Amino acid sequence: MAEQVVFDKPKVELHVHLDGAIRVQTIVDIAKRRGINLPAQTAEGMTRRICLEEPATLTVFLSKFNEYMHVIAGDREAIKRIAYEFVEDKAKEKVIYVEVRYSPHLLANTKVKPIPWNQQEGDLSPDEVVHLVNEGLREGEKAFNIKARSILCCMRHMPSWSMEVAALCKKYQHEGVVAIDLAGDESLNCEAYPEHRKAYEEAERCGIHRTVHAGEVGPATVVKEAVDVLKAERIGHGYRTLYDRDLYTKLREKNMHFEMCPVSSKLTGACQPDFTRHPIITFMKDKANYSLNTDDPLILSSTLHLDYRIAQNLMGFSEEEFKRVNINSAKSSFLPKEEKEELLYSLYEAYGMVQSTPF
Ligand SMILES: O=c1[nH]cnc2c1ncn2[C@H]1C[C@H](O)[C@@H](CO)O1
């Protein structure tokens, strides 16, 4: 059955993980080409292994990456392909600007300690991973006429990688990398290690934008640390900011942007499963600055349309609110000023908000 599309207009997406947005068929194809044995041979079978159907914990959710990352990591063609296909998938959802994030280290098989996913050492470094993703995104942009930028993730449990992440952000700053992020299991590592802090300091020094996963499943203190210590300009998720009303008020006064992911927040156990009582509703009613995003559509078996449908049908979103959300997303994007203005203009035009010049 065709999906109901509730806001069939140009959109902006700011929080989506490249390695959580791979097509299942691509995983199956690549495993076949590389001679990697999968627990299921078909896309349907692998979907059952990878996708979460019931609310779980962030830890369980993140364990799903173990099912397939070894298929993609260390393979040049695979990495370029997932970046290219990602852009195609976003274009189909009428996303005109996307910021996609990933950990270069988790896709590498050399110059990374430990080598992830039990891979044998190979010759693909985190640096080359970034180069390949950039190529795939660039080719996708040309083919599908949308704009795609990337964010490089530090991982909470791997502080020793973080300085290199900052260095890669700097090296590829003019080739589509716009920001640094800190992802991973906040429920296990609440306070950011000194290495993460140093990487964020370096990012700030080099003019690299900063976002941090915080207050998804961790307490509001993680959000506070993200803002005060890591100098985050946006917060990934941030639902639990609401547990500290003073912090919430302060961040709203600062016009802090929150990257919200409705479907994800239910299945990771970040929020209660009842969407009609979701924290996003408070952000909406308070006219806060936030975006709507998929996070990891592969593992959630979702699309951006599903997030919008839930927002409309269960959270009371109006067409006007969807427009406001996307305009705020564009304003909070990590594009340089001129490109941001161009993006905003495209949205105003598509939303019928451009005033005609009086004679
Ligand atoms: O929702 C999330 N919270 C924290 N970390 C996440 C989430 N989704 C994906 N990740 C992790 C797992 C990926 O391998 C990594 C980089 O994209 O980021």
Image (cartoon, grey):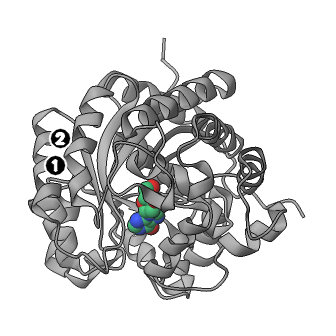
| SS for callout 1 | helix
Seen at 38% across and 40% down, the residue is: 126
Q: Is residue 245 left or right of residue 20?
A: left
| SS for callout 2 | helix
User: Residue 142 at what x, y percent from top left?
Assistant: 62, 21
For the view shown, which residue lies furthest in the front direction?
120
| 218 vs 294: above or below | below
The residue type indicated by label 2 comes to Ala
Pointer 2 residue: 203
| 64 vs 227: above or below | below
Of the 4 image quadrants, the one containing the N terminus is bottom right
The residue type indicated by label 1 comes to Tyr
Q: Is residue 94 visible?
A: yes
User: Residue 250 at what x, y percent from top left?
Assistant: 14, 67
For the view shown, which residue lies furthest in the right direction?
1
Of residues 353 and 322, the one drawn nearer to the viewer in this rendering: 322
Seen at 71% across and 46% down, the residue is: 34
Seen at 67% across and 58% down, the residue is: 305
Seen at 57% across and 35% down, the residue is: 76
Pointer 1 residue: 200
Q: Is residue 82 left or right of residue 13?
A: right
Which image quadrant is residue 242 in? Answer: bottom left
